[in-house]
Image (cartoon, rainbow, N blue to C red):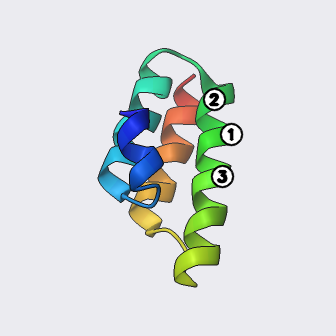
Amino acid sequence: MTDYLTIYPLQEEMNEILMQVYADNGDTGKLSRHYAAFKLAYRQELGVELPQKLHEKVVNWIEKN
């Protein structure tokens, strides 16, 4: 998965899957760091914010752990 993201770092679905794995493993540190880096890269490269739905999922995952 991380090899794929090396080639396509802004691919939303794969980033979401990776963050879900971190959440399922209870690793909120990795989840938070990955989300922050993804959010920044997305904004810098595309000039827009991440979809609100993804933001809400990440907040929910962090709150659960």
**Above or below, comparing residue 25 to residue 21 in the picture:** above
Q: Quadrant of the N terminus?
A: top left
> What residue is at 50 percent from the left and 41 percent from the top?
60
Residue with the most extreme top position: 25
SS of the residue under disc 1:
helix
Residue type (three-letter) at the residue carrying disc 3: Ala
Report, in whole angstroms, how far the alpha carbon at label 3 lies from the one at label 2.
11 Å
Q: Which residue is mark 1?
A: 33
Residue 48 in the image: x percent, y percent?
Answer: 54, 82
Front residue of 5 and 50: 5
**Above or below, comparing residue 30 to residue 45 in the picture:** above
Query: Which corner quadrant of the image does residue 21 belong to?
Result: top left
- As drawn, the label of residue 1 is none
Q: Which residue is mark 2?
A: 30
Badge 3 or badge 2: first in the primary sequence: 2
> What residue is at 67 percent from the left and 51 percent from the top?
36
Q: Which residue is mark 3?
A: 37
Mark 2 neighbour density, 10 Å: few (under 14) some (14–19) many (20 or more): some
Residue type (three-letter) at the residue carrying disc 1: Arg
> What residue is at 54 percent from the left and 17 percent from the top?
26
Mark 1 neighbour density, 10 Å: few (under 14) some (14–19) many (20 or more): few
Contact check, label 3 and label 1, Cβ < 8 Å: yes
SS of the residue under disc 3:
helix
Report, in whole angstroms, how far the alpha carbon at label 3 lies from the one at label 1.
6 Å
Residue 40 in the image: x percent, y percent?
Answer: 66, 64
**Above or below, comparing residue 35 to residue 20 in the picture:** below
Residue 45 in the image: x percent, y percent?
Answer: 57, 76
> What residue is at 33 percent from the left and 45 percent from the top?
14
Residue type (three-letter) at the residue carrying disc 2: Lys
Q: Quadrant of the C terminus?
A: top right
Mark 3 neighbour density, 10 Å: few (under 14) some (14–19) many (20 or more): few
